[in-house]
Amino acid sequence: MHLQQANTSDWLSSSWHRSTEAGLKQRRLPEDIRLPQSILKQRRHQSSDLIHIVERNALPLFNQMFARTDSRLILTDIEGVILASWGQERFKEKLTSIALSSGACWQEQLKGTNAIGTAIVEAKPVSIIGEQHFIHQHRFISCSASPVFDHQGQMVGILDITSEQQQHDSSVQLLVQNMVQLVENQLLSHIPQGTTRIDLACEKSLLHSGWQGIVIANEAGEVVAHNQVASQLLDQTSIVGECIDTLFNRTSLDTPFVFEKQHLKQPTTKRTRSISASCDLHHGEQKIEHAWQQANKVIDKGISLLILGETGVGKGEFVKALHKQSQRKSSPLVAVNCGALPKDLIESELFGYAPGAFTGASHKGFQGKIRQADKGILFLDEIADMPLEAQCRLLHVLQDKSVVPVGSNQSYQVDCQIIAATHKNLEQLVATGEFRQDLFYRLNGLAFTLPSLQHRQDKHALIEHIHRKYAEDEQTICPHLMSLLCAYSWPGNIRELDNLLKVAALLASDEAQLTLEHVPSHLAQHLTSLAQDDHHKFITTNATKGTANSDLRSTVEETLLQTYQANQGNISKTSRILGISRNTIYRKLKSLGILQ
């Protein structure tokens, strides 16, 4: 990645010349070249690591700066095909008029001068502001894009921020470059042979920032990877294969650098797996990220984990991700739902039983879940529902690291990592005598709570992520439904959200947009009540506060008009989609002068 751009007029003139040579006309909207959905899915799969890294490292920055603006963060492959985009849904709909959406190809020769296509040709960051676009219909937007390079200096994609023209300034280009640098630094984690990492910068304050140079060397002291900032600081396009001592002895004579050297105890791919797994769990929720980082530090240290949180918050998915990240990933992950097993069978299910140990027992006996988890991870979900008798036996297993099957005198050594989870208050159960205090202390090595969906800060991005799993083609969620989904309390948490979006996407499989009418009726009623309550609060608040809520009024009126126009003036359909009574819509449209 380049920190500085060449003279703007030079590359911009060249780009316009190339656009003319390609036969494009300024006043004619180019043909919409779009990949078939099947091929687009293949490309997304091929770039899945890059997409995950962007979601984890670039998207939180984008959301922080642009969440309330008409802007989109766009990721393309090296051919300019849009793989994914995030941001304002209303603005996304506007961009469909110029085919700036997933699957569309924005090569310069197809779309004329534009940030994505021109950044590919120039292989450097570019900003195209309004009138600088070659195609007239593109001039209502401004875009800043930067190539993403891998550790070998090969371009792997383009990261772009597109905004309404008046909302775009020079700081956007710097933000894009900072995002790309963070992404490129994470891509370095794919280098398994790296044993030494050197961070370098012109001054100490730039170390541990997005602008530091990073050089990875192997055991022989040869450079195996570096980021683009390192290339610029060392004034060499590529330093792969050079001896690291010779390289820095030579360059230090000319330029004063600040260095930090660290030995990589494990292959840096571990960090990448951590990022990918963590990204699957959240999209910027700091409480989950904090829990993830803590759990990763102790998962291989023989410390029991206790995961707290409401039903459906994703405790099971968290454990699956930890298993994939841990040193026990090649051994089994055995999950037991203690609340789903009959009390008279839980001991035989957990500890196993000898042949003929009880009536109905298999003549072969049963190994038991604990022995099945040997060398792996045993996940005890809903641990609070375990009977006291079974709690006592489990405590002995944890103390002695051995298990005695029901009906047997023989003990078997076991080595397994214990992870327990519950939605109940274990300390309160200990106080009432319903849970053993000594077992609680054994399980409570590292305890953390996963937040409910209602209290997560990344709900918007999470809803989009889950919807993309089930949506056909370019289906989007209408802004009004998105606002209702974000405001809903979600008593069933992620499990409830996932089920809703799966069903709704199927019901709307032939529609370009997911609306309230596609939501299953039982939940649609809750969302409708929520919408009516919000509308009532809106009317009441504005009656008492006058113009204090003018921005909110404008938003409500704009949503109403957009939905009314999108449905060709059909008030009944508008009422169903917005969850507002027909009388209220009539009254509002009259006040706006739409109806007489």
Image (cartoon, grey):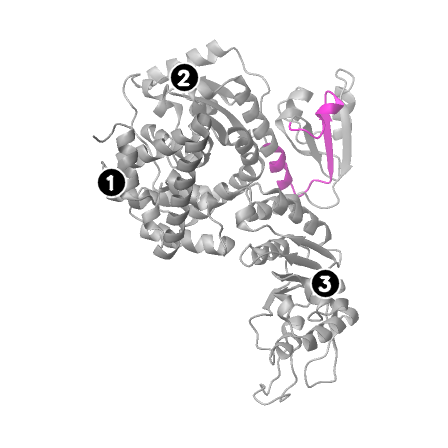
Residue at image mark 1:
571
Q: Secondary structure at mark 3?
A: helix
The answer for how far apart the CA atoms under marks 2 and 3 are is: 59 Å
Q: Quadrant of residue 417?
A: bottom right
Q: Is residue 421 above or below residue 77?
A: below
Q: Position of residue 567 (x, y in %)?
A: 25, 38
Question: With 130 as the anchor, is 253 left or right in this view?
Answer: right
Residue at image mark 3:
443
Q: Is residue 566 visible?
A: no
- Specify the farthest residue to the left: 596
Residue at 31 percent across and 41 percent down: it is: 512
Camera-side mark, 1 or 3? 1
Q: Is residue 27 visible?
A: yes
Q: Nearer the viewer, residue 235 or 594?
A: 594
Which region of the structure is painted magenta?
A: 184-210
Tell me which numbered mark, 2 or 3, is placed earlier along the sequence: 2
Q: Position of residue 551 (x, y in %)?
A: 43, 28
